[in-house]
Image (tube, rainbow, N blue to C red):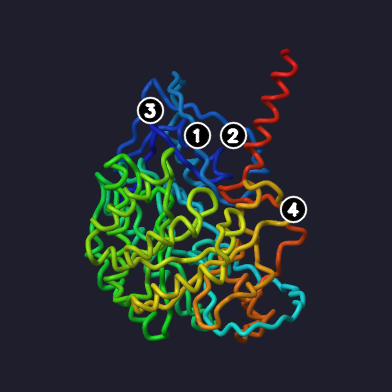
Amino acid sequence: MRIDGEYVGHLNHITTRSGSCRRSARLLSAPIHVQGQSTRPPEALAEVKAPSLPYRKAKRRKVEETPLDVVLTPQAPHSTEDYREVLEDDEEKDLDFTPTAKPKRRRQPEADPVYVIADVEKKQTTFEGRLGYACLNTVLRNKKPATDSVFCSRTCRLDSLKKNGIEFVKDLGRKNVEDLLTIIQWNEDNNIRFFRLSSEMFPYASHGTYGYTLDYCSELLAKAGALANQYGHRLTTHPGQFTQLGSPKPLVVEAAVRELTYHCQMLDMMGMGPDSVMIIHGGGVYNDKPRTLERLKQSIMDLPLKVRQRLVLENDEMCYNAEDLLPVCEELDVPFVFDYHHDNLFPSSLSPATIIDRANVIFSRRGIKPKQHLSEPRPGAVTIMERRAHADRCENLPPDLPDDMDLMIEAKDKEQAVFYLYRMYDLQPVIHESLRPATENPSMHTNGRKSTKRARAKVLKEATVEDESE
Protein backbone atom coordinates (compact mmCIF):
# COMPACT_ATOMS: atom_id res chain seq x y z
CA MET A 1 0.00 0.00 0.00
CA ARG A 2 1.20 3.57 -0.74
CA ILE A 3 0.68 6.45 1.73
CA ASP A 4 2.08 9.95 1.00
CA GLY A 5 4.27 8.50 -1.74
CA GLU A 6 5.77 5.78 0.47
CA TYR A 7 5.00 2.12 1.05
CA VAL A 8 3.54 0.90 4.29
CA GLY A 9 3.44 -2.71 5.48
CA HIS A 10 0.55 -4.27 7.48
CA LEU A 11 1.25 -6.97 10.06
CA ASN A 12 -2.15 -7.73 11.59
CA HIS A 13 -4.20 -9.68 9.02
CA ILE A 14 -3.91 -9.72 5.28
CA THR A 15 -6.36 -10.79 2.59
CA THR A 16 -4.81 -11.01 -0.88
CA ARG A 17 -5.80 -12.09 -4.34
CA SER A 18 -4.72 -15.53 -5.53
CA GLY A 19 -1.26 -15.52 -7.06
CA SER A 20 0.16 -12.81 -4.80
CA CYS A 21 0.97 -15.08 -1.85
CA ARG A 22 4.76 -15.09 -2.36
CA ARG A 23 4.90 -11.32 -2.77
CA SER A 24 2.93 -10.85 0.44
CA ALA A 25 5.17 -13.22 2.35
CA ARG A 26 8.30 -11.33 1.22
CA LEU A 27 6.75 -8.00 2.17
CA LEU A 28 5.90 -9.16 5.64
CA SER A 29 9.43 -10.33 6.36
CA ALA A 30 10.97 -6.99 5.34
CA PRO A 31 11.50 -3.73 7.27
CA ILE A 32 8.78 -1.10 7.19
CA HIS A 33 9.52 2.22 5.51
CA VAL A 34 7.11 5.01 6.46
CA GLN A 35 7.33 8.61 5.21
CA GLY A 36 11.01 8.53 4.39
CA GLN A 37 12.14 6.79 7.63
CA SER A 38 13.54 3.29 7.44
CA THR A 39 13.16 1.01 10.44
CA ARG A 40 13.82 -2.60 11.07
CA PRO A 41 10.75 -4.70 11.92
CA PRO A 42 10.19 -5.63 15.59
CA GLU A 43 11.52 -8.89 16.93
CA ALA A 44 8.07 -10.41 16.52
CA LEU A 45 7.51 -10.39 12.77
CA ALA A 46 4.87 -12.01 10.57
CA GLU A 47 5.27 -15.51 9.30
CA VAL A 48 2.72 -16.37 6.64
CA LYS A 49 1.41 -19.88 6.15
CA ALA A 50 1.50 -20.82 2.47
CA PRO A 51 -1.78 -21.82 0.86
CA SER A 52 -2.47 -25.47 0.23
CA LEU A 53 -2.76 -25.10 -3.56
CA PRO A 54 0.44 -24.76 -5.65
CA TYR A 55 1.21 -21.27 -6.90
CA ARG A 56 0.52 -22.07 -10.55
CA LYS A 57 -2.89 -23.53 -9.80
CA ALA A 58 -3.75 -20.59 -7.58
CA LYS A 59 -2.75 -18.16 -10.33
CA ARG A 60 -5.03 -19.86 -12.84
CA ARG A 61 -8.03 -19.67 -10.53
CA LYS A 62 -10.51 -16.82 -10.67
CA VAL A 63 -9.82 -13.86 -8.41
CA GLU A 64 -11.07 -14.69 -4.96
CA GLU A 65 -10.41 -13.83 -1.34
CA THR A 66 -7.72 -15.93 0.34
CA PRO A 67 -7.34 -15.18 4.03
CA LEU A 68 -3.84 -15.82 5.31
CA ASP A 69 -3.36 -16.73 8.95
CA VAL A 70 -0.68 -14.53 10.49
CA VAL A 71 1.42 -15.97 13.32
CA LEU A 72 3.86 -13.74 15.18
CA THR A 73 7.22 -15.48 15.63
CA PRO A 74 10.78 -14.14 16.19
CA GLN A 75 12.66 -13.58 12.92
CA ALA A 76 16.16 -12.40 11.99
CA PRO A 77 16.25 -8.74 10.84
CA HIS A 78 16.48 -7.91 7.14
CA SER A 79 18.15 -4.97 5.48
CA THR A 80 16.46 -2.00 3.87
CA GLU A 81 18.05 -3.01 0.56
CA ASP A 82 16.21 -6.34 0.72
CA TYR A 83 12.97 -4.51 1.26
CA ARG A 84 13.58 -2.13 -1.66
CA GLU A 85 14.42 -5.11 -3.87
CA VAL A 86 11.00 -6.51 -3.08
CA LEU A 87 9.35 -3.20 -3.95
CA GLU A 88 11.20 -2.99 -7.26
CA ASP A 89 9.91 -6.44 -8.22
CA ASP A 90 6.33 -5.56 -7.36
CA GLU A 91 6.20 -1.89 -8.29
CA GLU A 92 4.15 -2.54 -11.42
CA LYS A 93 1.77 -4.89 -9.59
CA ASP A 94 -1.37 -4.05 -7.69
CA LEU A 95 -0.71 -4.17 -3.96
CA ASP A 96 -4.29 -3.34 -2.92
CA PHE A 97 -5.22 -5.87 -0.25
CA THR A 98 -8.84 -4.66 0.14
CA PRO A 99 -11.15 -7.72 -0.05
CA THR A 100 -13.57 -7.60 -2.97
CA ALA A 101 -16.92 -9.36 -2.98
CA LYS A 102 -17.39 -12.02 -5.61
CA PRO A 103 -20.04 -10.80 -8.07
CA LYS A 104 -23.28 -12.78 -7.97
CA ARG A 105 -24.35 -14.53 -11.08
CA ARG A 106 -27.83 -13.58 -12.23
CA ARG A 107 -29.82 -16.65 -13.07
CA GLN A 108 -30.78 -16.73 -16.69
CA PRO A 109 -34.56 -17.01 -17.29
CA GLU A 110 -35.60 -20.46 -18.33
CA ALA A 111 -37.21 -20.96 -21.70
CA ASP A 112 -40.94 -21.50 -21.61
CA PRO A 113 -41.66 -25.24 -21.72
CA VAL A 114 -43.78 -26.68 -24.48
CA TYR A 115 -46.86 -28.42 -23.09
CA VAL A 116 -48.71 -31.19 -24.83
CA ILE A 117 -52.42 -30.73 -24.13
CA ALA A 118 -54.61 -33.76 -24.72
CA ASP A 119 -58.04 -33.51 -26.28
CA VAL A 120 -61.09 -33.77 -24.06
CA GLU A 121 -64.28 -35.71 -24.41
CA LYS A 122 -67.05 -33.39 -25.55
CA LYS A 123 -70.25 -33.30 -23.48
CA GLN A 124 -73.48 -31.34 -23.40
CA THR A 125 -75.03 -29.13 -20.71
CA THR A 126 -77.58 -26.33 -20.40
CA PHE A 127 -75.51 -24.64 -17.68
CA GLU A 128 -74.77 -20.98 -18.42
CA GLY A 129 -73.43 -19.76 -15.07
CA ARG A 130 -69.90 -18.96 -13.92
CA LEU A 131 -67.26 -21.49 -12.91
CA GLY A 132 -64.70 -20.47 -10.32
CA TYR A 133 -61.67 -21.75 -8.47
CA ALA A 134 -60.25 -21.25 -4.99
CA CYS A 135 -57.37 -19.20 -3.64
CA LEU A 136 -54.42 -20.12 -5.85
CA ASN A 137 -53.58 -19.82 -9.53
CA THR A 138 -51.15 -22.59 -10.50
CA VAL A 139 -49.85 -20.83 -13.63
CA LEU A 140 -48.95 -17.65 -11.77
CA ARG A 141 -47.76 -19.44 -8.63
CA ASN A 142 -45.28 -21.58 -10.55
CA LYS A 143 -43.64 -18.78 -12.53
CA LYS A 144 -39.84 -18.86 -12.75
CA PRO A 145 -37.74 -17.45 -11.23
CA ALA A 146 -39.48 -17.73 -7.88
CA THR A 147 -39.27 -13.96 -7.37
CA ASP A 148 -41.83 -13.59 -10.18
CA SER A 149 -44.31 -15.94 -8.51
CA VAL A 150 -47.79 -14.48 -7.92
CA PHE A 151 -50.00 -15.63 -5.05
CA CYS A 152 -52.18 -14.27 -2.24
CA SER A 153 -51.40 -16.55 0.69
CA ARG A 154 -48.10 -15.27 2.08
CA THR A 155 -48.01 -16.02 5.77
CA CYS A 156 -45.55 -16.82 8.54
CA ARG A 157 -45.24 -18.58 11.86
CA LEU A 158 -46.10 -16.85 15.09
CA ASP A 159 -42.42 -16.95 16.08
CA SER A 160 -41.59 -14.91 12.96
CA LEU A 161 -44.20 -12.34 13.95
CA LYS A 162 -42.69 -12.03 17.42
CA LYS A 163 -39.18 -11.77 15.99
CA ASN A 164 -39.83 -9.38 13.10
CA GLY A 165 -42.74 -7.38 14.46
CA ILE A 166 -46.27 -6.69 13.28
CA GLU A 167 -45.14 -4.43 10.42
CA PHE A 168 -43.43 -7.42 8.84
CA VAL A 169 -46.73 -9.32 8.88
CA LYS A 170 -48.68 -6.34 7.57
CA ASP A 171 -46.28 -6.11 4.65
CA LEU A 172 -47.12 -9.72 3.75
CA GLY A 173 -50.77 -8.73 3.58
CA ARG A 174 -49.96 -5.75 1.39
CA LYS A 175 -48.05 -7.96 -1.05
CA ASN A 176 -50.95 -10.43 -1.11
CA VAL A 177 -53.35 -7.68 -2.18
CA GLU A 178 -50.92 -6.45 -4.82
CA ASP A 179 -50.79 -9.95 -6.29
CA LEU A 180 -54.59 -10.19 -6.08
CA LEU A 181 -54.74 -7.37 -8.63
CA THR A 182 -52.63 -9.48 -10.99
CA ILE A 183 -54.82 -12.55 -10.46
CA ILE A 184 -58.04 -10.63 -11.10
CA GLN A 185 -56.65 -9.29 -14.37
CA TRP A 186 -55.39 -12.75 -15.37
CA ASN A 187 -58.80 -14.25 -14.60
CA GLU A 188 -60.51 -11.63 -16.76
CA ASP A 189 -58.10 -12.28 -19.62
CA ASN A 190 -58.93 -15.99 -19.36
CA ASN A 191 -62.73 -15.67 -18.98
CA ILE A 192 -62.88 -16.68 -15.30
CA ARG A 193 -65.06 -14.34 -13.28
CA PHE A 194 -65.55 -16.21 -10.03
CA PHE A 195 -62.75 -16.52 -7.45
CA ARG A 196 -62.38 -17.39 -3.77
CA LEU A 197 -59.99 -15.22 -1.77
CA SER A 198 -57.47 -16.92 0.48
CA SER A 199 -58.19 -16.77 4.21
CA GLU A 200 -54.49 -15.96 4.68
CA MET A 201 -54.64 -12.65 2.82
CA PHE A 202 -53.80 -10.89 6.10
CA PRO A 203 -51.93 -13.25 8.46
CA TYR A 204 -52.98 -13.09 12.12
CA ALA A 205 -55.42 -10.24 11.48
CA SER A 206 -57.96 -11.93 13.76
CA HIS A 207 -55.47 -13.14 16.38
CA GLY A 208 -56.52 -12.51 19.97
CA THR A 209 -53.20 -10.89 20.92
CA TYR A 210 -51.55 -9.76 17.68
CA GLY A 211 -54.63 -8.97 15.60
CA TYR A 212 -54.88 -5.70 13.68
CA THR A 213 -57.31 -3.78 11.49
CA LEU A 214 -56.96 -3.50 7.72
CA ASP A 215 -57.09 0.30 7.65
CA TYR A 216 -53.43 0.51 6.63
CA CYS A 217 -54.29 -1.34 3.38
CA SER A 218 -57.67 0.26 2.66
CA GLU A 219 -56.59 2.07 -0.51
CA LEU A 220 -55.05 -1.04 -2.05
CA LEU A 221 -58.08 -3.14 -1.12
CA ALA A 222 -60.39 -0.56 -2.69
CA LYS A 223 -58.30 -0.71 -5.85
CA ALA A 224 -58.57 -4.51 -6.03
CA GLY A 225 -62.31 -4.39 -5.38
CA ALA A 226 -62.82 -1.69 -8.02
CA LEU A 227 -61.06 -3.87 -10.61
CA ALA A 228 -63.19 -6.88 -9.70
CA ASN A 229 -66.40 -4.83 -9.86
CA GLN A 230 -65.35 -3.27 -13.16
CA TYR A 231 -65.13 -6.74 -14.72
CA GLY A 232 -68.17 -8.12 -12.90
CA HIS A 233 -66.18 -10.70 -10.93
CA ARG A 234 -67.60 -12.43 -7.89
CA LEU A 235 -65.19 -12.77 -4.96
CA THR A 236 -66.03 -14.93 -1.94
CA THR A 237 -64.24 -16.24 1.16
CA HIS A 238 -64.25 -19.50 3.11
CA PRO A 239 -62.87 -19.04 6.67
CA GLY A 240 -61.05 -22.10 8.02
CA GLN A 241 -62.38 -25.13 9.84
CA PHE A 242 -61.48 -23.63 13.22
CA THR A 243 -64.34 -21.13 12.79
CA GLN A 244 -66.68 -22.95 15.19
CA LEU A 245 -69.74 -20.90 16.08
CA GLY A 246 -71.36 -23.90 17.79
CA SER A 247 -68.50 -24.62 20.18
CA PRO A 248 -69.36 -24.98 23.89
CA LYS A 249 -66.19 -22.96 24.70
CA PRO A 250 -66.78 -19.18 24.72
CA LEU A 251 -63.16 -18.44 23.76
CA VAL A 252 -63.52 -20.57 20.61
CA VAL A 253 -66.71 -18.75 19.65
CA GLU A 254 -65.04 -15.38 20.25
CA ALA A 255 -62.16 -16.39 18.00
CA ALA A 256 -64.65 -17.46 15.31
CA VAL A 257 -66.42 -14.11 15.50
CA ARG A 258 -63.10 -12.27 15.15
CA GLU A 259 -62.26 -14.36 12.09
CA LEU A 260 -65.59 -13.61 10.44
CA THR A 261 -65.29 -9.92 11.30
CA TYR A 262 -61.86 -9.77 9.66
CA HIS A 263 -63.18 -11.37 6.45
CA CYS A 264 -66.18 -9.05 6.45
CA GLN A 265 -63.95 -5.99 6.89
CA MET A 266 -61.81 -7.09 3.95
CA LEU A 267 -64.82 -7.48 1.64
CA ASP A 268 -66.34 -4.20 2.82
CA MET A 269 -63.11 -2.29 2.17
CA MET A 270 -63.02 -3.79 -1.30
CA GLY A 271 -66.51 -2.46 -1.92
CA MET A 272 -67.90 -5.89 -2.79
CA GLY A 273 -71.67 -6.37 -3.00
CA PRO A 274 -73.93 -8.93 -1.27
CA ASP A 275 -72.84 -11.74 -3.63
CA SER A 276 -69.44 -11.74 -1.89
CA VAL A 277 -70.40 -14.14 0.89
CA MET A 278 -68.43 -15.90 3.64
CA ILE A 279 -68.96 -19.68 3.74
CA ILE A 280 -68.53 -21.75 6.90
CA HIS A 281 -69.48 -25.27 8.00
CA GLY A 282 -71.55 -26.22 10.99
CA GLY A 283 -68.42 -27.35 12.85
CA GLY A 284 -68.16 -30.18 15.36
CA VAL A 285 -71.09 -31.92 17.08
CA TYR A 286 -69.44 -32.07 20.53
CA ASN A 287 -71.28 -35.32 21.37
CA ASP A 288 -74.65 -33.58 21.21
CA LYS A 289 -75.77 -32.40 17.77
CA PRO A 290 -79.14 -30.86 18.80
CA ARG A 291 -77.59 -28.72 21.54
CA THR A 292 -74.73 -27.73 19.26
CA LEU A 293 -77.19 -26.61 16.59
CA GLU A 294 -78.94 -24.43 19.19
CA ARG A 295 -75.61 -22.83 20.13
CA LEU A 296 -74.87 -22.32 16.44
CA LYS A 297 -78.17 -20.51 15.91
CA GLN A 298 -77.60 -18.31 18.94
CA SER A 299 -74.10 -17.39 17.82
CA ILE A 300 -75.37 -16.45 14.37
CA MET A 301 -78.09 -14.23 15.85
CA ASP A 302 -75.47 -12.52 18.04
CA LEU A 303 -73.20 -11.65 15.12
CA PRO A 304 -72.74 -8.01 14.09
CA LEU A 305 -75.26 -7.15 11.36
CA LYS A 306 -72.65 -6.63 8.63
CA VAL A 307 -71.08 -10.00 9.39
CA ARG A 308 -74.37 -11.84 9.50
CA GLN A 309 -75.43 -10.37 6.14
CA ARG A 310 -72.46 -12.04 4.44
CA LEU A 311 -72.67 -15.39 6.24
CA VAL A 312 -73.75 -18.61 4.50
CA LEU A 313 -73.66 -22.23 5.72
CA GLU A 314 -72.45 -25.30 3.81
CA ASN A 315 -73.01 -29.01 4.38
CA ASP A 316 -69.92 -31.08 5.19
CA GLU A 317 -68.95 -34.72 4.80
CA MET A 318 -68.60 -35.66 8.48
CA CYS A 319 -70.91 -33.82 10.89
CA TYR A 320 -73.74 -31.85 9.28
CA ASN A 321 -75.42 -32.83 6.03
CA ALA A 322 -77.89 -30.71 4.08
CA GLU A 323 -80.85 -32.05 6.06
CA ASP A 324 -79.22 -30.89 9.31
CA LEU A 325 -78.48 -27.33 8.21
CA LEU A 326 -81.34 -26.41 5.87
CA PRO A 327 -83.84 -25.93 8.73
CA VAL A 328 -81.38 -23.64 10.53
CA CYS A 329 -80.84 -21.60 7.36
CA GLU A 330 -84.56 -21.33 6.68
CA GLU A 331 -85.28 -20.26 10.24
CA LEU A 332 -82.55 -17.59 10.37
CA ASP A 333 -82.77 -16.56 6.70
CA VAL A 334 -79.14 -17.56 6.16
CA PRO A 335 -78.29 -18.78 2.62
CA PHE A 336 -77.28 -22.41 2.19
CA VAL A 337 -74.50 -23.55 -0.17
CA PHE A 338 -74.90 -27.12 -1.39
CA ASP A 339 -71.71 -29.16 -1.84
CA TYR A 340 -72.21 -32.13 -4.19
CA HIS A 341 -69.10 -33.99 -3.06
CA HIS A 342 -69.99 -33.71 0.63
CA ASP A 343 -73.52 -34.86 -0.09
CA ASN A 344 -72.15 -37.98 -1.79
CA LEU A 345 -70.08 -38.81 1.28
CA PHE A 346 -72.70 -37.86 3.88
CA PRO A 347 -76.06 -37.93 2.09
CA SER A 348 -79.41 -36.85 3.48
CA SER A 349 -82.87 -38.19 2.68
CA LEU A 350 -83.40 -35.17 0.41
CA SER A 351 -82.47 -35.26 -3.27
CA PRO A 352 -79.96 -32.68 -4.57
CA ALA A 353 -82.71 -31.08 -6.67
CA THR A 354 -84.92 -30.62 -3.60
CA ILE A 355 -82.06 -29.21 -1.53
CA ILE A 356 -81.11 -26.73 -4.26
CA ASP A 357 -84.71 -25.61 -4.72
CA ARG A 358 -85.11 -24.89 -1.02
CA ALA A 359 -81.72 -23.18 -0.86
CA ASN A 360 -82.53 -20.99 -3.87
CA VAL A 361 -85.63 -19.67 -2.10
CA ILE A 362 -83.38 -18.16 0.58
CA PHE A 363 -80.91 -16.80 -1.98
CA SER A 364 -83.76 -15.16 -3.88
CA ARG A 365 -85.29 -13.65 -0.76
CA ARG A 366 -81.92 -12.19 0.24
CA GLY A 367 -81.11 -10.90 -3.26
CA ILE A 368 -77.96 -13.03 -3.55
CA LYS A 369 -77.03 -15.08 -6.59
CA PRO A 370 -77.06 -18.83 -5.77
CA LYS A 371 -73.75 -20.66 -5.60
CA GLN A 372 -72.84 -24.30 -5.09
CA HIS A 373 -69.64 -26.36 -4.76
CA LEU A 374 -68.45 -29.21 -6.96
CA SER A 375 -65.60 -31.67 -6.49
CA GLU A 376 -64.93 -35.38 -6.97
CA PRO A 377 -62.99 -38.04 -5.03
CA ARG A 378 -59.55 -39.04 -6.22
CA PRO A 379 -59.13 -42.11 -8.45
CA GLY A 380 -58.89 -45.35 -6.50
CA ALA A 381 -60.31 -43.92 -3.28
CA VAL A 382 -62.49 -46.41 -1.39
CA THR A 383 -62.91 -45.51 2.27
CA ILE A 384 -64.59 -42.33 3.49
CA MET A 385 -61.26 -40.84 4.57
CA GLU A 386 -59.73 -41.58 1.16
CA ARG A 387 -62.73 -40.20 -0.71
CA ARG A 388 -62.63 -36.91 1.18
CA ALA A 389 -59.56 -35.74 -0.75
CA HIS A 390 -60.41 -33.75 -3.87
CA ALA A 391 -59.47 -34.97 -7.33
CA ASP A 392 -57.23 -32.89 -9.57
CA ARG A 393 -60.13 -32.19 -11.94
CA CYS A 394 -63.84 -32.89 -12.29
CA GLU A 395 -65.02 -35.13 -15.11
CA ASN A 396 -68.69 -34.15 -15.12
CA LEU A 397 -71.11 -31.38 -14.32
CA PRO A 398 -74.06 -32.57 -12.19
CA PRO A 399 -77.18 -33.45 -14.21
CA ASP A 400 -79.46 -31.46 -11.86
CA LEU A 401 -77.31 -28.33 -11.95
CA PRO A 402 -79.44 -25.16 -12.36
CA ASP A 403 -78.75 -23.22 -15.54
CA ASP A 404 -78.01 -19.82 -13.99
CA MET A 405 -75.89 -20.02 -10.87
CA ASP A 406 -72.23 -19.87 -9.82
CA LEU A 407 -70.34 -23.12 -9.32
CA MET A 408 -67.09 -23.23 -7.35
CA ILE A 409 -64.81 -26.01 -8.63
CA GLU A 410 -62.90 -27.32 -5.61
CA ALA A 411 -60.13 -29.26 -7.37
CA LYS A 412 -56.37 -29.53 -6.92
CA ASP A 413 -55.62 -28.17 -10.39
CA LYS A 414 -57.46 -24.93 -9.59
CA GLU A 415 -57.89 -22.83 -12.76
CA GLN A 416 -56.86 -25.79 -14.93
CA ALA A 417 -59.88 -27.71 -13.63
CA VAL A 418 -62.05 -24.79 -14.79
CA PHE A 419 -60.42 -24.79 -18.23
CA TYR A 420 -60.96 -28.54 -18.44
CA LEU A 421 -64.72 -28.09 -18.02
CA TYR A 422 -64.72 -25.07 -20.34
CA ARG A 423 -63.27 -27.21 -23.11
CA MET A 424 -65.39 -30.25 -22.33
CA TYR A 425 -68.72 -28.40 -22.38
CA ASP A 426 -67.76 -25.46 -24.64
CA LEU A 427 -68.62 -23.00 -21.89
CA GLN A 428 -65.97 -20.34 -22.62
CA PRO A 429 -63.11 -19.83 -25.09
CA VAL A 430 -59.73 -20.91 -23.70
CA ILE A 431 -56.29 -19.43 -24.40
CA HIS A 432 -54.05 -22.37 -25.32
CA GLU A 433 -50.95 -20.79 -23.74
CA SER A 434 -52.74 -20.86 -20.36
CA LEU A 435 -53.36 -24.62 -20.46
CA ARG A 436 -51.31 -27.15 -18.51
CA PRO A 437 -51.46 -30.94 -18.90
CA ALA A 438 -53.15 -33.09 -16.29
CA THR A 439 -51.08 -35.36 -14.05
CA GLU A 440 -50.50 -38.72 -15.69
CA ASN A 441 -52.01 -41.67 -13.83
CA PRO A 442 -53.22 -39.77 -10.75
CA SER A 443 -53.70 -41.84 -7.60
CA MET A 444 -55.82 -41.42 -4.51
CA HIS A 445 -52.83 -39.88 -2.71
CA THR A 446 -52.19 -36.15 -2.78
CA ASN A 447 -49.29 -33.92 -1.84
CA GLY A 448 -51.57 -31.78 0.27
CA ARG A 449 -52.03 -31.65 4.00
CA LYS A 450 -54.99 -34.05 3.89
CA SER A 451 -52.94 -36.92 2.53
CA THR A 452 -53.02 -39.88 4.91
CA LYS A 453 -50.28 -41.89 3.20
CA ARG A 454 -47.59 -41.19 5.80
CA ALA A 455 -49.98 -41.53 8.70
CA ARG A 456 -51.18 -44.93 7.53
CA ALA A 457 -47.58 -46.04 6.91
CA LYS A 458 -46.68 -45.02 10.47
CA VAL A 459 -49.63 -46.94 11.91
CA LEU A 460 -48.69 -50.01 9.86
CA LYS A 461 -45.08 -49.79 11.06
CA GLU A 462 -46.16 -49.51 14.71
CA ALA A 463 -48.49 -52.49 14.30
CA THR A 464 -45.65 -54.54 12.79
CA VAL A 465 -43.38 -53.68 15.72
CA GLU A 466 -46.08 -54.75 18.19
CA ASP A 467 -46.56 -58.06 16.37
CA GLU A 468 -42.82 -58.73 16.43
CA SER A 469 -42.64 -57.91 20.14
CA GLU A 470 -45.41 -60.37 20.87
Of mark 4 and mark 3, the one earlier in the sequence is 3
What is the secondary structure assignment of the residue under circle 4? Answer: loop
Q: Element at badge 3?
A: loop
3 vs 2, front mark: 2
**Tag 1 near tag 4, CB within 8 Å:** no
Residue type at mark 1?
Answer: Leu
Q: Give the foreground label among 1 and 4.
A: 4
Disc 2, SS: loop
Q: Residue at x 29, y 68 (%)?
A: 309
Whether residue 143 is visible: no
Please say if the residues under marks 2 and 1 sit with CB atoms less than 8 Å apart. yes
Residue 361, picture quadrant: bottom left
Is 401 in front, or is 241? 401
Left or right for 190, reference 438: left
Within-10-Å neighbours for mark 1: few <14, some 14–19, many 20+: some
Cα–Cα span, label 2 and label 1: 8 Å
Which residue: 48% across, 30% down? 69
Cα distance between the residues tagged 1 and 4: 64 Å
Gap between marks 3 and 2, in whole Å?
Answer: 24 Å
For marks 4 and 2 on the same chain, the one whose residue lies earlier in the sequence: 2
Amino acid residing under circle 3? Pro
Which is more N-terminal, label 4 or label 1? 1
Q: CA distance from mark 4 to mark 3?
A: 83 Å
Which residue, given by chain and number where applicable, does mark 2 sit on? 51
Q: Amino acid at mark 2?
A: Pro
Which class describes the residues within 10 Å of circle 2: few (<14), some (14-19), or many (20+)? some
**Residue carrying label 3:** 41
Q: Nearer the viewer, mark 4 or mark 2?
A: 4
